[in-house]
Amino acid sequence: MRPRLVHVITRFCVGGAQLSVFDMCRDLREDFDIHMVCGPDVGDEGSIYEEVAAEFPTTLLPVLRRAVRPREDVRAARALRRLYERLRPAIVHTHSSKAGVLGRLAARDSGAGVVHTVHGWGHTPADSRARRTAFVTSERLAARWCHRLVAVSRDTRDEGLRLGIGSPDQYEVIPEYVDYSPADPDFTGTRRRAREALGLPPDATVVGWVGRFMPQKDPGTLADAAGRLLEARPELHVCFVGDGPDRGEVESRLDGRDGRVHFAGFRKDIRPLYAAFDVLLHTSRWEGQPRVPQEAIAERVPVVTARVAGTRDLIGSGPVGFEVEPGDAEAFARRAGQVLDDPALRAPLSEEAVGAVAAANGRELALARHRELYATLLSLGSPR
């Protein structure tokens, strides 16, 4: 019999953590009897719940919510404990802040090996001191209830250790599960189809962005950098793929640019669309290890990214773009211009450059390290 592996995550929205879990489990289904557990919340970025449930046994817990609701959180922990008693997992693997704390609490004395992946810490620079303290205290406590902590980047691990979350011997650094094989090896054909799908001129110079318009993604800096590039380069087009509450801010600040600004809205299958861009901007103020720049590089598109957790593991692996300080719109515009003016950096990136990043961060590495981790966990009892 295959050992049972239970993944617990707060929600299956379209996000980096969710896609990493889903993709990894597809490659592990021959080795493990996999069961998924999630809550009902869905953001405006869409959901992959139906796709996950079609491929794996999946339990939806109505009381497992993203928001902090003490009464429901107690009920969710109890429901998870009952579920573990029924499923009798060999390994419990939790993801995201809420499911991570409750899922580890419920797994105490379950007999399972327990691991939690930090795709990005629940506390952020935008939080109040009280909220940040509450999240950090919860993570310190929950670290006692698991055998291993997986950090998706060295920066994420280092932050956890600085905050007293877990011990050095608990941490494994395993990057997000990203396939660095392009959607189509024919870059020219992929670019033509992507530009048709996005309504872009076939021969334009295009700066792209992919994400959710929200404070974490710093829409102000994004609009400022895009505006500088549009002013300096009359031939340039800018394309934004995504939606969110702060989209209006970017639209209003870039209004009146003679049809050179394109808002493509939310697109579920983004991978074939990256090839439309000559360079991708990634302006986030915080991350664990951002997925969007990785997908862009995989599709042979260079990136200019804010220097946040995980980006040094990407940009430092090969000649694929630049890091700049978060919030520095002038630096974003300058570095993007440098990419556009350098034939060695402009899309499509070379196979050698993409291969170097893939070797240090890609799917094969993540899969091998997870297999090693799970083999270790199978030999352990539950933490107490």
Image (cartoon, rainbow, N blue to C red):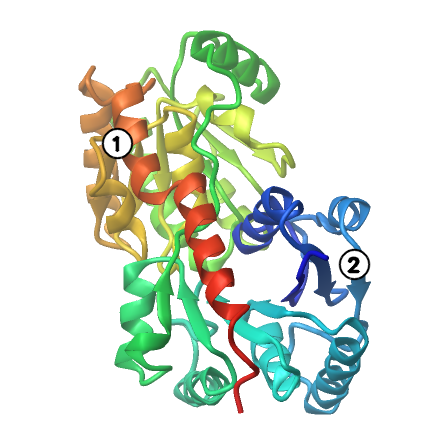
| Residue 170, horizontal then vertical, whole percent | 37, 75
Could you classify mark 2 by the number of other residues whose Cα lies within 10 Å: few (under 14), some (14-19), or many (20 or more)?
Answer: some
Residue 58 — which label?
2
Left or right of residue 1: residue 289: left
Q: Amino acid at mark 2?
A: Thr
Residue 136 occupies which quadrant of the picture?
Answer: bottom left
The vertical placement of 206 against 382, above or below, is: above
Circle 1 is placed at which residue position? Answer: 320
N-terminal label among 1 and 2:
2
| Front one among 231 and 225 | 225
| Front one among 192 and 370 | 370
Residue 59 occupies which quadrant of the picture?
Answer: bottom right
Q: Does residue 233 appear anywhere in the picture? A: no
Q: Quadrant of the N terminus?
A: bottom right
Left or right of residue 154: residue 341: left
The vertical placement of 378 against 222, above or below, is: below
| Residue 236, horizontal then vertical, whole percent | 35, 20
Could you classify mark 1 by the number of other residues whose Cα lies within 10 Å: few (under 14), some (14-19), or many (20 or more)?
Answer: many
The vertical placement of 180 against 28, above or below, is: above
Residue 43 occupies which quadrant of the picture?
Answer: bottom right
As measured in the structure, the alpha-carbon distance from the residue carrying label 1 to the one carrying label 2 is 38 Å
Q: Amino acid at mark 1?
A: Val
Element carrying mark 2: strand
Q: Residue at x 61, y 36 (%)?
A: 265
Q: Residue at x 34, y 17 (%)?
A: 348
> Which residue sits furthest front?
1
